[in-house]
């Protein structure tokens, strides 16, 4: 699967259209050296954690180690829990730029949507602003590598692009985004934004707060769900915020489903509101973040990037970003 993907990428690079290599920089991740495999942990059977190197973050698992799926007669299995590297979010500064595919840039025949832009601080405007596009990938790297063939608890799809904000008119139109996401008006007040400070602390110490689904932790607010960031403090923080906004949008659109909890043991189901506790991120580009801090090289959604984010952004080749998302998975591994 990986060889086929790389062959496809190579073919696209050599073809004159519709994709061309341009000013877009990037690199396909090395699954051996660029992925922090420790993030799959902890493994659990029922509520008992049986492997957890480095005290990795986890959420509650179904308590019963025995599960059943189907009917007449039901199949009996064991309740497993782990963190599956299944999704990837890409935040490029230019439209139709694919850093994770080796820096491919789509040739659109002259049409260009809203471009990346950043404004600097001035006396009249003390904060910087930014705009980025974002891409959502299905990235079942465990299945693609053939680590566990035909395992019932792994998503058995191919690596593919599931969503591009270049085709989403609400991503670069604040007014249209407000009409499509009217709940944003509920959280555009000082009290709701102040709660995100507590969410920042919780995400950095343990995990995000379930009671504040509108927050993005230390990166601010999930709303409005668009590519404009009015408080740009750096590419790492901004890209983390847009990664959260993108995945929240995917849940709302029904593209991303819920894979954890007792109700998901026999299969995932739609969940319009993203559970931020069920995801961990690892930077893959421009600098794969495999350095362990307190035994961990993955971060919660909303966790501060102060400890690990330095030297992760640099001119030209280091201004686009990509993150591997480890998604909490509970499933019933059928025995008979």
Image (cartoon, rainbow, N blue to C red):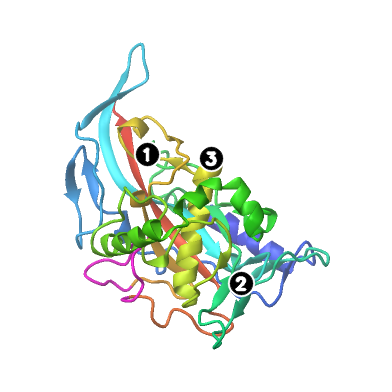
Percent x, y of residue 257: 46, 40
- Would residue 306 be counted in the magenta stretch? yes
Under tag 1, what secondary structure?
loop
Dot 2 surroundings within 10 Å: few (below 14), some, or many (20 or more)? many
Of the pair 123 and 292, the residue shown nearer to us: 123
Percent x, y of residue 183: 51, 47
Mark 1 and mark 2 in contact (Cβ < 8 Å)? no
Of the pair 104 and 281, the residue shown nearer to us: 281
Of the pair 187 and 141, the residue shown nearer to us: 187
Is residue 70 shown left or right of residue 270? left
Vertical comparison of 66 with 238: above or below: above
Q: Can you identify the residue that label 3 sits on?
A: 254
Q: Principal SS element in the magenta part?
A: loop
Mark 1 and mark 3 lie on one chain; the one further toward the N terminus is: 1
Please count the marks in the image.
Answer: 3
Dot 3 surroundings within 10 Å: few (below 14), some, or many (20 or more)? some
Is residue 83 shown left or right of residue 186? left
Percent x, y of residue 75: 32, 21
Of the pair 237 and 42, the residue shown nearer to us: 237
Please state the extent of the stretch shown in magenta in the rendering.
Answer: 291-307
Estimate the spatial distance between the alpha carbons at disc 1 and disc 3, rounded to whole Å: 21 Å
Q: Can you identify the residue that label 1 sits on?
A: 153
Mark 2 and mark 3 lie on one chain; the one further toward the N terminus is: 2
Residue at 18% over, 46% down: 49
Dot 1 surroundings within 10 Å: few (below 14), some, or many (20 or more)? many
In front: label 1 or label 3: 3
Q: What is the number of the mark on residue 93?
A: 2
In front: label 2 or label 1: 2
Under tag 2, what secondary structure?
loop
Is residue 248 shown left or right of residue 198? right
């Amino acid at each position: 699967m990986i060889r086929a993907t790389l062959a496809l990428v190579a073919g696209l690079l050599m073809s004159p259209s519709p994709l061309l290599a341009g000013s877009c920089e990037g690199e396909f991740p090395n699954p051996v050296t660029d992925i922090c495999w420790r993030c799959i942990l902890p493994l659990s059977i029922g509520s008992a954690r049986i492997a957890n190197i480095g005290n990795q973050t986890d959420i509650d698992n179904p308590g019963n180690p025995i599960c059943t799926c189907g009917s007449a007669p039901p199949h009996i299995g064991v309740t497993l829990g782990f963190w599956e590297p299944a999704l990837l979010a890409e935040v490029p500064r230019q439209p139709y730029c694919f850093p994770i595919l080796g820096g491919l840039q789509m040739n659109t025949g002259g049409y260009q949507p809203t471009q990346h832009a950043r404004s600097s601080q001035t006396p009249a405007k003390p904060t910087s602003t930014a705009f980025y596009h974002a891409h959502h990938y299905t990235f079942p790297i465990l299945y693609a590598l053939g680590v566990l063939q035909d395992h019932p608890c792994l998503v058995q799809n191919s690596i593919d692009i599931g969503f591009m904000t270049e085709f989403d008119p609400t991503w670069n139109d604040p007014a249209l985004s407000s009409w499509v996401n009217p709940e944003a008006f509920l959280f555009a007040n000082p009290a709701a934004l102040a709660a995100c400070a507590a969410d920042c602390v919780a995400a950095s110490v343990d995990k995000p707060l379930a009671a504040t689904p509108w927050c993005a932790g230390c990166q601010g607010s999930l709303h409005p769900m668009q590519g404009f960031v009015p408080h740009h403090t750096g590419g790492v923080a901004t890209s983390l915020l847009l990664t959260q906004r993108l995945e929240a949008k995917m849940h709302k659109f029904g593209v991303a489903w819920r894979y954890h909890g007792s109700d998901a043991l026999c299969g995932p189901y739609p969940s319009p509101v993203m559970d931020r506790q069920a995801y961990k991120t690892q930077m893959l580009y421009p600098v794969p973040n495999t350095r362990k801090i307190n035994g961990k090289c993955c971060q919660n959604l909303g966790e501060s990037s102060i400890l690990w984010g330095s030297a992760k952004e640099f001119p030209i080749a280091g201004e686009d970003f990509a993150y591997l998302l480890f998604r909490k998975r509970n499933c019933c591994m059928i025995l008979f």
